[in-house]
Image (spheres, rainbow, N blue to C red):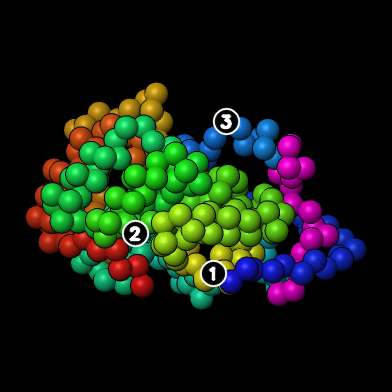
Amino acid sequence: MRKFLIAFLAIAFLFAGCTVNVGDESDKNKNDNESSSSTEAQNTEKGYTTIPDATNLATPFEDYSRNKIVWGPGNIENHQRPTDPTALESKYSKIGGKWLLNDKKAICLTFDEGYENGYTPSILDTLKEKRVKAIFFVTYDFAKSNPELIKRMIDEGHIVGNHTYRHYTMDEVDLSVAEEEISFLHEYIKKNFNYEMKYFRFPKGEFSEQTLFLAHEMGYTSVFWSFAYADWDTQNVVDTATALNKLTGSTHDGAIFLLHAVSPTNAEILPQAIDDIRAQGYKFTVNIT
């Protein structure tokens, strides 16, 4: 991938940021558990702050809003296609945002991989047995610590997606840092696995128009989701019956499911979930576009 350059532009005023929340308010900041405990220390060490430096905006990025947008778990009722993801995709698809599939009788399984908790091999075993492909969004820490799992994902026909270098919240760091979050992992995977990633997932589902445009300009489609549930908290694991009912009861046309591979529940219920979802008439795909 070509090196993405950001030309810095002096701006005499600061932009006031605001947050636009979409989805389940109570869960909006819980949908990703893979932030490492060293993030703040890394920020300090690198000299980064959690507030973007407004002097480091550049054309054409100044044409896009820096306001934070938070996407949380989708609320599915009666297997109906949810309205919030539909509206978001309609608004942001031109700059690479994807919340739903075009194929309405298909479902895409995606797994976020911030760290390995011992369940990914079982998930891969099930996917292989059931002949289902999935997208695994990995961080640099996961990829570096689990090269055998990355290789297996690739060898077995799954898609490996970019979930950032250090799992920074993309709209809360300078654009040059946000660019590094994507490019560093991209080049690492390319160099070590001869694999070029093309799908990106924002940590915690938090983004801005600027950072969405940034990923798009770097050649990425940003894959969000139309359904997720509280599977990230390993201290409060959802019981298998509840989780299975949640998954199979939340299917809808063109669904993109966000699951976390740190959950023992997901590994346990996945075989039955796949069978039940197929029985509803859906096929599984990784064809995002």
* Image quadrant containing the C terminus: bottom left
Name the element at disc 1. loop
Three-letter residue code for mark 3: Ser
Q: Is residue 202 visible?
A: no
Residue most extreme to the right:
12
Q: For the stretch drawn in magenta, what is the main secondary structure? A: loop
Crowd tier of the residue under label 3, counting other residues whose Cα lies within 10 Å: few below 14, some 14–19, many 20 or above: few
Name the residue nearer the viewer: 143 or 33. 143
Q: Position of residue 152 (x, y in %)?
A: 29, 50
Residue at point 20%, 50% (across, down): 127
Identify the mark at residue 1; answer none if there is no mark: 1
Three-letter residue code for mark 2: Ile
* Image quadrant containing the N terminus: bottom right
Q: Position of residue 201 (x, y in %)?
A: 47, 55
Name the residue that disc number 2 marks.
159
Three-letter residue code for mark 1: Met
Q: Write down the quadrant of residue 264 in the picture.
A: top left
Residue 7 counted in the magenta span: no
Q: Which residues are magenta?
A: 44-60
Q: Write down the quadrant of residue 17 in the picture.
A: bottom right
Q: Position of residue 274 (x, y in %)?
A: 16, 50
Q: Nearer the viewer, mark 1 or mark 2?
A: 1
Name the residue nearer the viewer: 182 or 245. 182
- Ranked by sequence position, the earlier of labels 3 and 1 is 1
Name the residue that disc number 3 marks.
37
Residue at point 24%, 42% (across, down): 123
Name the residue nearer the viewer: 111 or 18. 111
Q: CA distance from mark 2 to mark 3?
A: 27 Å
